[in-house]
């Protein structure tokens, strides 16, 4: 199998080089057949890489320890999910995974754009193939994941590092790689546009969605990394400005900049050179990030170890890449002339420009500071290092300015804002910011960084709310629906704009979490059993220290009771795990999560003989908003990415007031579920309460009766349930007893899963699937024959002056 | 020279100067010298009071801890030169006899004084993706 794998890698290299040469020659000679065969070869690479991936995953799953890579990163006892994750757990595999993703993405991108951007395709194929060839070359020459032991192979593997055996860590690298690799596609299209000279905006349209997808995955990967660091590493924070973390952040900055500046080019035909440059820089930074983490050029405790040969190859590739890319930019400069000049600094394009500068500055600052030890050593011979405080000192103000621009941008009009217009737009957001600032000041939160951040968050939220409300009002006036329905319609009409605003809300929530770090509290305490330590309004008591073993590891657990304001809050068990096959123990943090603040306890040291334990107790305010903010951000991005059809369908067929009804129902459901969770009950009892229908006629299960706690049905049922449970019945017996007592199965919320009753179980699924298929078919039908479905709404109501001004505005924006 | 290019140049110059100035001032506070024990011991008085990241190996059986406290005393060495170290706080899991460590702190008259959370112990094996945890030391 290993031989086949190596052969496949070689074959991929050969096929990719054929794809490269035949597309280049085909494009030069304008030979349709050569181009077609190049595309075919290009597809073939992804097929070959898929087979190679299947082989290595198979080797991991079956435990083929003759392959060195498998032996090093896997073991028999490892859970199956982590055997999959081992594929990208080490250097060689991660490069292979990279090529696999790239070939698949390339195939998808070429297949979807083949007809629309015919003239660009051969060059896209060429650029992506060249990148694939570089990585394949690395693997074949230097880091073959399929290389085997020449002599006797070991019987078992070393196992994946326990720190990486964590759910978030299993999905963090693929997410980050997906983001990195997706950035190759915009680069390939950008280069194709430069080479062919087709530098109108069509290449931008082809790559816009790719950039968004890549950006989403990059953000997801970075967030997962933070979550992993927070839960698994136990140092109380989530971002340490480690070179490897920074490597992921660098392209994120430039990709974010690109997503904004691309709008300026679409609307105003400006910033063309800038956009091409950003695409090139983003791609370069993904390669550079890979280089930084894999060649050992930067000292990092979690880089992949030093490798001079690899560093050389990467350096050559990067130099070629830069010369080639910027060479073409300079060559095509005459074609990249802007269609317009900047009219005024008080305009949206100016805000975007400022945002771009700051993002680019952030990227270069982080790059500089990360490389600083290496730079200083090569210049002066002295190795000077900079730590997280240095990064924070610079990035805090930069982040705040970015946040400010997030709020300002949407308030400014394209081209030029008049003073009256600006006053009208800024009044409410500024008021929100001032109120928030005053509130923060009254609470005594330090004004620099945290306080300012909160005020700015208020400002941005004010801006976004105002945008939504004003837009919805116009639409309501036009369509005559209620405000919520109008809002959904609004989002549907310009998904990118309002999806973008939702992304901004997510960013604001994440900034809340970052600001919370400004007033986190940390204590270290050495405690004997019974002793207590206090941090903020929390007190923890050390109860005992225990040592237990299981097959994989020895666990040393501290047992802690946490109190909040004197009341018992929770029993917590921070621990250290010593895995049998690894020297280094892992820290198992005990976290008590809450929206306001997390109580975060680490067992930092211990002495089993005296039962003393050292705890690091951290109060992390607002940290959960980061994870939640990412959810909002992902939702917004998804909205912006949704295809036109899906939305057109939903809006056209949406009955008026449907949204409001849904919202009201949701609001009703939330308190009901919240109430159901308040009383502590045994698990069995909870299950049964969901199983048994309340008999008051409310048609709800016992745990969800809207009449509770004054329900006559529950008053009858609860003692009965207690009685059955007291007799020691299990779940099925209690259910049977209730059926017997009531005299029919209709007392149960779900029929007993047996015999004929199974059909009843199946029924909802059958209906669900049928419904989904029907909706899909109908949607397809409608979107095909009725493409103008959402348009009449606007056309029929253009008498409305408010809408007309807005429409004019939008049309003018479109030039 | 057109006035536009002139303005642009002036703006770039001001921004560049401001940036360089800020960078210089913050760098001088933010940087630390990365040194091995023997390099520092060659001329200790030159390093007194400077912010250092000291690289060395923990001397076997030199780790002492005052009972029921987090006060540590130990020695680090490289190339035969030994330096006494004092530290108060939590040590990383990998901190033990013979471990390769990087200590953040400054040189005082009685030895090297490590900052809080300033003990970083390196993992002995190569690609063992280690964490800021081991670095930050808590």
Image (cartoon, coloured by chain):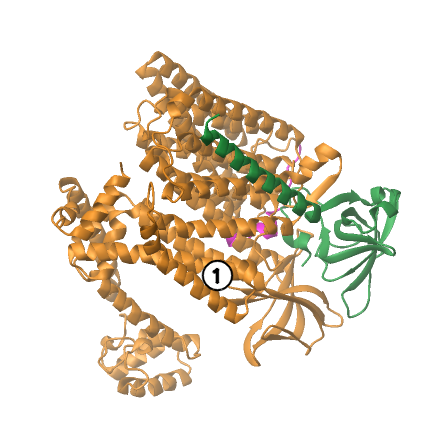
Chain colours: A orange, B green
Q: Is residue A149 left or right of residue A12?
A: right
Name above or below for residue A120 compared with residue A50.
above
Q: Is residue A809 visible?
A: yes
| Main SS of residues in magenta | loop
Name above or below for residue A614 compared with residue A565.
above
Name above or below for residue A206 compared with residue A411.
above
Q: Residue at x 56, y 32 (%)?
A: A146
Is A158 a magenta residue?
yes
Corner quadrant of residue A549:
bottom right
- x then y, percent, for residue A456: 46, 57
- The chain letter under disc 1 is A
Q: Quadrant of the C terminus of chain A?
A: top left
- x then y, percent, for residue A28: 37, 14
Is B90 a magenta residue?
no
Nearest the viewer among A2 and A644 is: A644
Q: Is residue A627 visible?
A: no
Label 1 sits on a secondary structure element that is: helix
Q: Is residue A35 left or right of residue A521?
A: left
Tag 1 residue: A454
- Magenta range is A151-169
Name above or below for residue A697 compared with residue B124.
below
- x then y, percent, for residue B27: 67, 45
Q: Residue at x 25, y 56 (%)?
A: A472
Q: Residue at x 74, y 54 (%)?
A: B95
Nearest the viewer among B47 and A721 is: B47
**Label 1: how many Cα within 10 Å (few below 14, some 14–19, many 20+):** many
């Amino acid at each position: 199998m290993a031989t086949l794998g190596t052969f496949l890698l070689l074959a991929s290299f050969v096929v990719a080089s054929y794809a490269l040469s035949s597309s280049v020659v085909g494009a030069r000679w304008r030979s349709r057949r050569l181009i077609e065969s190049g595309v075919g070869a290009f597809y073939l690479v992804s097929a070959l890489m898929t087979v190679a991936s299947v082989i290595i995953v198979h080797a991991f799953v079956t435990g083929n320890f003759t392959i060195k890579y498998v032996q090093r990163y896997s073991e028999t006892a490892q859970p199956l999910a982590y055997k999959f994750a081992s594929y990208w757990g080490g250097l060689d595999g991660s490069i292979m995974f990279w090529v696999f993703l790239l070939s698949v993405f390339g195939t998808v991108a070429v297949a979807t754009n083949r007809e629309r951007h015919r003239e660009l395709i051969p060059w896209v194929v060429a650029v992506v193939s060249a990148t694939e060839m570089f990585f394949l070359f690395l693997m074949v020459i230097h880091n073959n994941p399929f290389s085997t032991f020449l002599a006797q192979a070991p019987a078992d593997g070393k196992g994946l590092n326990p720190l990486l055996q964590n759910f978030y860590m299993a999905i963090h690298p693929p997410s980050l790689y997906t983001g990195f690799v997706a950035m190759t596609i915009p680069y390939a299209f950008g280069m194709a546009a430069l080479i062919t000279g087709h530098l109108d905006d069509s290449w931008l349209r082809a790559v816009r969605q790719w950039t968004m997808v890549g950006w989403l995955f990059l953000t997801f990967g970075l967030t997962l990394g933070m979550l992993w660091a927070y839960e698994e590493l136990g140092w109380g924070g989530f971002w340490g400005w480690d070179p490897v973390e920074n490597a992921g952040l660098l392209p994120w900055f430039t990709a974010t900049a690109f997503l904004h500046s691309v709008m300026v080019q679409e609307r105003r035909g400006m910033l063309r050179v800038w956009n091409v440059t950003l695409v090139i820089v983003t791609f370069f930074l993904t390669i550079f990030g890979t280089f930084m983490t894999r060649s050992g050029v930067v000292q990092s405790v979690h880089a992949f170890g030093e490798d001079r040969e690899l560093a050389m190859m990467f350096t050559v590739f990067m130099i070629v890449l830069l010369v080639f890319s910027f060479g073409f930019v300079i060559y095509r400069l005459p074609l990249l002339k802007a269609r317009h000049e900047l009219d005024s600094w008080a305009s949206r394009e100016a805000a975007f420009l400022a945002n771009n500068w700051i993002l680019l500055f952030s990227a270069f600052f982080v790059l500089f500071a990360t490389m600083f030890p290496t730079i200083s050593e090569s210049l002066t011979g002295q190795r000077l290092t900079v730590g997280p405080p240095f990064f924070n000192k610079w990035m805090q103000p930069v982040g705040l300015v970015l946040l400010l621009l997030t709020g300002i941008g949407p308030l400014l009009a394209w081209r030029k804002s008049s003073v009256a217009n600006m006053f009208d737009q800024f009044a409410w957001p500024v008021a929100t910011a001032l109120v928030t600032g005053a509130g923060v000041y009254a609470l005594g939160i330090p004004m620099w960084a945290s306080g300012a951040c909160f005020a700015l968050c208020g400002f941005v939220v004010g801006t976004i709310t105002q945008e939504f409300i004003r837009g919805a009002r116009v639409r309501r006036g036009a369509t005559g629906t209620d405000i919520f329905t109008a809002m959904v319609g609004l989002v549907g009409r310009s998904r990118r704009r309002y999806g973008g605003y939702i992304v901004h809300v997510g960013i604001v929530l994440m900034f809340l979490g970052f600001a919370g770090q400004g007033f986190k509290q940390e204590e270290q305490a050495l405690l004997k059993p019974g002793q207590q330590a206090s941090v903020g309004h929390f007190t923890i008591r050390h109860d005992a220290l225990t040592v237990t073993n299981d097959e994989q590891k020895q666990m040393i657990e501290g047992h802690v009771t946490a109190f909040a304001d004197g009341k018992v809050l929770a029993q917590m068990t921070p621990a250290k795990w010593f895995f049998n096959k690894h020297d280094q123990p892992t820290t198992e943090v005990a976290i008590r999560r809450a929206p306001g603040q997390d109580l975060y306890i680490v067992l930092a040291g211990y002495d089993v003989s005296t039962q003393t334990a050292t705890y690091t107790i951290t109060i992390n305010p607002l940290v959960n908003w980061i994870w939640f903010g990412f959810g909002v951000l992902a939702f917004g991005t998804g909205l912006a990415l949704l295809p036109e059809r899906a939305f057109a369908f939903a809006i056209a067929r949406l009955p008026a007031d449907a949204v409001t009804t849904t919202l009201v129902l949701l609001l009703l459901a939330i308190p009901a579920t919240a109430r159901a969770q308040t009383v502590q009950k045994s698990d069995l009892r909870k299950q049964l309460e969901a199983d048994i229908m309340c008999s008051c006629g409310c048609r709800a299960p016992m745990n969800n009766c809207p009449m509770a706690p004054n329900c006559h049905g529950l008053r009858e049922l609860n003692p009965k349930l207690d009685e059955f449970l007291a007799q020691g019945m299990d779940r099925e017996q209690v259910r049977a007893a209730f059926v017997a007592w009531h005299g029919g199965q209709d007392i149960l919320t779900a029929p007993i899963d047996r015999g004929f009753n199974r059909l009843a179980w199946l029924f909802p699924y059958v209906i669900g699937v049928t419904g989904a298929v029907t909706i899909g078919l109908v949607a397809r039908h409608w979107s095909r024959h009725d493409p103008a479905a959402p348009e009449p709404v606007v056309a029929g109501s253009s008498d409305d002056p408010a809408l007309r001004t807005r429409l004019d505005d939008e049309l003018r924006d479109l030039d | 020279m057109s006035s536009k290019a002139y303005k642009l140049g002036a703006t770039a110059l001001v921004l560049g100067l401001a940036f360089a100035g800020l960078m210089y001032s913050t760098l001088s506070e933010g940087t630390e010298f990365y040194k091995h024990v023997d390099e520092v011991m060659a001329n200790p008085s030159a390093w007194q009071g400077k912010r250092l990241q000291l690289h060395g190996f923990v001397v076997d059986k030199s780790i002492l801890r005052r009972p029921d406290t987090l006060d540590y005393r130990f020695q680090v060495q490289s190339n035969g030169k030994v330096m006494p170290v004092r530290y108060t706080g939590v040590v990383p899991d990998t901190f033990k006899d013979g471990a390769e460590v990087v200590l953040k702190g400054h040189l005082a008259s009685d030895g090297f004084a490590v900052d809080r959370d300033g003990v970083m112990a390196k993992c002995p094996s190569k690609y063992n993706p280690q964490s800021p945890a081991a670095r930050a030391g808590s």
